[in-house]
Each structure stands twice: as structure tokens, then as C-alpha cells.
Amino acid sequence: MPPLLRAEEITVSFGGRRALDGVSLTAEAGRVTGLIGPNGAGKSTLFDVVCGLRRPRTGRIRLDGRDITREGPARRARRGMSRTFQHLELFGRLSVRDNLLVAAELGPGRRHAARTADAVLARLGLTGVADDAADALPTGLARLVEVGRALVLGPRVLLLDEPAAGQDAEETRRFAALLRSLADEGTAVLLVEHDMSLVMSVCDEVHVLDLGAVVASGPPSRVQTDETVLTAYLGEVRP
Amino acid sequence: MDQFLAFTVVGLSTAAVYAVIGTGLVVTHATTGVFNFAHGAAGMLSAFAYWQLAVGWGWPVPLALAFVLLVLAPAFGLFVERVLMRPVQALGEAERLVMTVALLTGCIALARWVWDPNTARPLTPFLADRPALRLGPAAVTWHQAITMAVALAIAAALWVLLHRTRAGTEMRASVDDRALAGLTGADPLRATRLAWVLGIQLAAVGGILIAPAVALDAQQLSLLIVSAYTAAVFGRLRSLPLTFLGALVVGLLEAYLAGYLPQNDYLPGLRLAAPALLLFLALLAFPHRRLRGRDRTPVRVPLPTVRGSLLLAGTVVLFALVLVTVLAEDDLLSYGTLFPLGVIALSFVPLAGYTGQISLCQLSIAGIGAVVWGHLGAHGELWALPVAMLVTAAVGALIALPALRLSGIYLALGTAAFAVVLDRWIFTLPAFDVLGVRITFFDQGSVTVSGPDLFGLRLTSPSQLLVLSAVCLALASVGVAALRRGRFGRRLIALRDSEAAYATLGGRLLVTKTAVFALSAGIAGLGGALYGMQLQTVTADQFNLIAGLPIFLIAVIGGLGAVGTGLFTGIAFVLPAQLMSGLGSWVHDVTALLVALAGMGLAHSPSGVLAQMRAEWAPLGRNRPLLCGLLGVLGVCWLLAALDVANGWLLLAIALVTALLLRVRAAAAQRPPTDIPPEWWGVRRPWRSEDGEVLSRATIAAG
């Protein structure tokens, strides 16, 4: 069975600099795939390419085997892809509930939008802040609202860009459980995160990006002992 | 060939002026990040000041020039920087734009007030008495030669300033990151001041150089800036050489169009509109990153309740009934325009308030609505009213297509250019046929507009038309409030707050933007048709860009996110001018100046005064006995005015004073709630709008 999402040989250039250089990776249904790497490695750029906000110079994005490279972000969302952002992109002037409602009204369950939004709010424990303005929330909570907004679409592929930033240990533990339950429901989760304990505990597979290229891939246990990965994060260790 | 050379010389001379003005615009923008809509107006004021000194008071030309360029222009630049721009520096791009629009409106009003527009003020070109220079077959006047020489000298001086001096480096550093520039030892404030002084000086040079070639008219001179805008956009608002190139293209194009455009009824307007058309195209052709700015401080959008919006609608209709019963027939026509103008202002709310798309052509679109209604509804055909709205909605949808590529000030600039194209060209066209359909605008004159036939009842009297306009404003307000509460309103706000998130959730940007532009244009078209009915005869001048700016300004002052902005704008635009109309013809200019000044005070209340007023009047609204008392007093005043047994001014004063006193009384009567300690307000229970006032009163009372 082919992977649900496949990025093939993606190249993106900013001016003369290659932000992504022939990156290929896959995300499978029912699995959490981690994407890690130092700042500037190209993780968020890859997310932009996958969700359609940025066109790659070369390469293909396939969903269910279908080439969607030339499709816009809205079309991809309707095919079952949704995401969160590294820099918060909430609808700040709307309430938390309205943030989810906008997504629900655009998604496949638009007939029962209110019910869908309320169910996700309850699942994420956000019912208490449902009527608060989104731009008044602390960062950790705001990131959770973004996750909720993405979940309302009932995505098959969920792209999460540093969703646990700003969360305390307990919140992160609950968030890890949420990710596992989403994967168990059949969602393909692609996770960019700097919290290594979260990545290592929740991911089935991890890809490591450095300077726009995948330098290592595999299960978390193998990746965290990989020499190339350690060099990418810590630099050359000289005796 | 001789003719071609002659036009080339004229074109080069005009290009030199545009280059000077355009570089001033670029210097200001590149250093301060502010796109100065009033740049041309500064040049206009300088030209008037120069005329006053050199011609009016007979000062020697060099002295007058030196005084304007070295004293007045720098002083004006420093005034703009210190008083207008510094308070809004920390606010959003929209606020800075509004400041410069207010300045433009204020400058024009001031010039018209000081220098009577009906008096001709010719300015002699420099060295006009000397014979023209001969360059082969072409003759170059000394004024033209001086203009070109000045442009080249300024180009060289600016290059040296920006690239070879410390001040220039500071200026270039300030635009990228003021705070960072400050940390490296630069002085961003000094750079900003210098940029404003230089920018205004360059505008002054341009204004003085071009004034002899055109009539010394406040509006015309201020709009010459459109050509300079085009040059600056060619330079992507940062490159001086490209700005010069742009100026060259615009100047030569204008000269060749003047010389070679065939003589018929359809094309003279095209020559006048060419710079605006070129600006429109240049904006679309250069989708540079800096041309796609994003405002990070969006307008607040209160959520109106059903009860609140119905109350507003009722107030609008009741207000109309009061006016109908207390005003004479002549006054009804002039006061009655407040409701149609309110409808036009309301069109800003979904477009600019919810979606953040700043359009400066809403009044021009309203003009199309007035014309369509005027022609199709000449005998009161009611179906023509929705048709007028549909036509304007289609025009709005057309504007939405380029709007996808533009945002912020660039969209404002594009819509301003569109308004100028309509005003200078399209509205001046004689009737023509398209696919067998006869299209007529203002018939190169005026169009008579009459009232509709409402199911057998022909509305013709001023009072009937006034009530009709008020009912339309009330319905439109309820409609916009319902839109805000509903699915489409949420989408508009979502689109404004994050286009990226909206798109990745499955939202279609093109569809949503087109829909809101069409909706807003439809509302403006309805307002235009009603405005036409009230005016009875409409001309193109009543719907031009400059006429629309005060309406935009007042809507911003009211608060673009509030549904009540329509009524507020109508009242604020019409009432003061009409109440003072007996005092003289200068009242119009002074009220326009006041609007501009109020706009300049935006920094003190960026969310709009309506939100503030609502908070101030809310205690009275909740205090039943006092509210009943106020309604009683208003009712008695109305009765006395309707029966004409007391002076109208006196009754107005009594009504206002009573309302203000009762408002103060209601605020004082409001006791702080005792159940939750004040330090927990906003934590253990939601923060209420009156809490701030209650706390400040308690603090003052405690000494």
C-alpha cells in the first residue's frame, strides 16, 4: 500500500540559496512521522510546499498516489490536508469557538459545523476559553487552538509545526496522548518539533533535515544515536 | 520630426518635475516606511505660498524661493513628522495611511479657504523674458531647461547624500529596522526628520516648477502626484534611478498622447487619465515583496447583537421622521444627503473593517450607481434600483481581481488610481454602444435623477426621499450586522487575520475577496442612487476621488469595524456643514479642514470614536428612569419644534445639554459591583465596558 503522503525530490531556492535540496519523505496513515532539524534546516519551508503555500522549483507532492503539486492550498485542504504554523496564524479578532467554526464551515462537515467545533473544543479541553478572543490567549493555549482548528476539518494528513512550544510538562504529556490517539484513528501526522522527548516518545519514524537535505531517517531509537544527526545538532566534536 | 522633438522636449521637462516629486516620495517612504498620500498636496501648498510671496506680496523671486524651500517646506516636514506621524509610528500601516489622507484633505481645504478658488493666480515661468534655447530644430524654454537641470542636480545630490554621507547611511538603515539601527549608533529619529524635510522640500521644488504650466488649483495640483506615484512605483518605492526612468516614461507618454492622440470625443479624457491608468498597470506589473505589505494591527470588529442592530435601525428611521417634521423643504434636501452618504460609508465596513481591503473608490462606484439609476429609473422603475446595485457589484468584482495581488497602501493606491480613471476619463465619455447596449454616463454634463415608484406611490417630495434613504440605511445596517454575526462575516475576518490559514483550511481567496468587493460596491451603488435622488441632478465632480476622501476619513474616525459607522459618517459629514451653512461659503472648507484635523487625531482612538461613545453612553442606556426622562425631554422638544412654537436652535441645545447631563448622572449613579473585589474583575468575571470608568471614578473619589 503506497504511503498517504509522499514528497519527492523537493527543491526550493530563495535567491541563490537552496532552502530545500532534493528532499524526499513519506507520511503514512496511522503513524506519527517526526521532522526534526536545527533552525533554518528547511522544515517549515517543506510544510509550506506540502500544503501548497509555496511552489517547489522541482519535485512532486503526491497524496494517495495522486500528483497534487500544482494544486493550491484550498484544494489540498479539501483533499484532507490541514496544518498549523510555526508563527501563530490564528484569526485573532474572532473568539476561539469562531476560529474552529470558520474551519468547520469550510470543511466536509459544514452541515454540522457547530457540533463539530464544540466536539473538538471539548476534546482539547478548550471549552472554558471558547468565548475568549483568540489574540488574548497565552501562547501554549493559542497553539492548541490552532491544532483544534486543523482537527475540525477531520484531516487525513495533519501537519503540525512546533505545536508544543509554550506548553508545560503536563500539557505536553496530554498532547502526546492526543497525537497517539489521532494516529490510532488513522490520521497521518507529520510533526515538526524541537521538544525531543516528545518527538522520541510519540513518533513512529523520524526524518532529520539539515541545510535543506534529509541527513537521516528511521525509528527514533536509531536516529537519536546517528552520528550525522549528532553532528547536525551539536557540530563537529573534536578530540 | 520637428513636432516630435517639440513634444519630446515638453515630455522631458514634465518628466523632470515628476522625477523630482517622485524621488521625494521615495526618500520619505524608503526611510520612514510611510507612503505619503499628501506629497502632492505639500507641493501644491508650496506653489501657493510661492505665488503669495512672489506675486501677491511682490517679494523678489530668489527671496521667495529661498523662503519657501528653506523655511516653509522644512518647517512643514518637521510638523508632519512630529505632530502627525510620530504618534502613529507604532500603530499599523492603515493608520499611517489615514494620517496622510487626512493631511491631503486638510491641505486642499486649507488652500481653498485661504486662496479663493474662483480667483485666477497665474505664475510666470522662470526667465520667461529670455528667448528660447535652440537645440537643432527644437526650442527649449529657459524654464524647461532649468527644470531638467534641477532634476539632474537633485539626482546627483541625493546619490551623494544616500551613499557617501553618514546621514544617508542612517536613513537607509532606519527603514529596515529602526531599533536595530539605533543599537548600532545611528539616530533613527534624526534620519526620519531628515527624510520628511527632504521629501517635502522636493515636493515643493516640483510644485513650484510645474505650477506655471498648469492652473494654480488646489485639487489639480494635488492630483499631479498621481504621475509621480507612477514614477515611484516604477522605482518600487526604493530605487531612485528606476523612479527617474518611471518619470521619463510617464512624462513622455503624456506629451505624446497630447500631441498624437486622435481628436474625437472619446479620447481627451484618456490623456488626463493616462498616468492613473499607468499607475494601475505598474502596481500590477511589479508584485514585489514590498508591494505586498501586511498590516499587523487590524481594526477591532465588535459583534453586534440582534437587539442592538434593530435598535440602531429604529434610531435611523426615527431620526429621519424627526428631521421630516422639523425641517423646511429646502433644508430637507441638503440634510437628507446624510442617509445616502451613510449608506456609502457603510460599504467600508465589510470591505475595509472586516476584510482589511482599503478602497478609496467607493464614492466613484456610488457615482456609477447614481448614473445607472438616473438612466434606467428615469420614470421611477423600481427594478432599476437592484439593477444599479448589480452593475456596481460587477464593477466591484472587477476591482477584486487586481486586489488579489495588492494589499495595504498599494491597494489604496490602486483604487485611488481607479477613481481617477473613472473621474477623468470614463465619466467624461459621451454615450457609446457595447454589443448593442447603449452605455451612457454623465452625458458630458449632468444627469437628472428622480425618485422611485414604490408600488404605485411615486416618491418625489424631499421628505419622502429622505425617509426612503433612511429606511435603506436602516436595512443596510441590519444586513451588515447580520453579515458580521453570520458565516460570511466570520470568513471575512478570518481572511483578514490570516490569509495563509484561511487558504490552508480550504477557503478560496479569490471567491471571498470578489464576493466582499461586490457586496461592498453594491451597497455603495445603492447609496449612490439614493444620493442622486436627494441631489436631483448629479455631475461627475460630485463623485471624484477628492470628494470621497472625507467620507473615508470620517468612517475611519467612527471605526471601520462598527455597523453604526454609516449613520455616524452621514451625521458627521452633513450636519456641521449644514448647521453652519448660513455663516458663509467658507464653511465648507473649514468643515473639511475640521474633518482632516479629526482624522489626524486618530492616534488617540485607533479603534474609532464609536466604541468610546458606546462605552460612555452605556450607563444611561441601562438606567431605565433616566433613559425615560431623556426620551421624554426629546419627545417634548420634537413636539415643540414640529409645532414651530419655539426656536429650533434653542430646542436642539436643550436636547443636547439634557442628554449630556443625564449621561453624567447615569455614570455617577452606577455603583461598583460589590460581589467581586475590583482586583478580580476581568478574572473571576468578564471585564465589562463600564468597569474602566467605574474604577477611575473610585480612584478619583479616593483622592
Image (cartoon, rainbow, N blue to C red):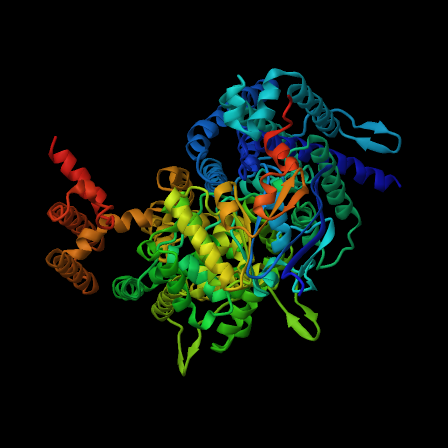
Q: Which residue is painted at 56% across and 52% down in the image?
A: A204
Q: Quadrant of residue B19?
A: top right
Residue toward you, A12 or B574: A12
Q: Is residue B577 above or below residue A38?
A: below
- Give the residue at the far bottom of this rendering: B456
Locate the C terminus of chain B by quadrant.
top left
Look at the picture and state if B104 lies above or below B688: above
- Residue A127 visible? The answer is yes
Percent position (x, y) of residue B168? 61, 21
**Residue B551 in sight here:** no
Q: Position of residue A235 (x, y in %)?
A: 62, 29
Q: Image quadrant of residue B376? A: bottom right
Between residues B114 and B245, which one lies in front from this camera angle? Answer: B245
Residue A156 sits in quarter: bottom right
Between B369 and B230, which is closer to the camera in this rendering? B230
Residue B72 image position (x, y, % from top left): 51, 24
Report the number of numbered marks: 0
Relative side of B155 to A201, left or right: right
| Residue B359, x across and y down, in percent | 52, 52
**Who is closer to the viewer here, B93 or B593?**
B93
Q: Is residue B589 above or below residue A181?
A: above
**Left or right: where does residue A126 sit relative to residue A52?**
left
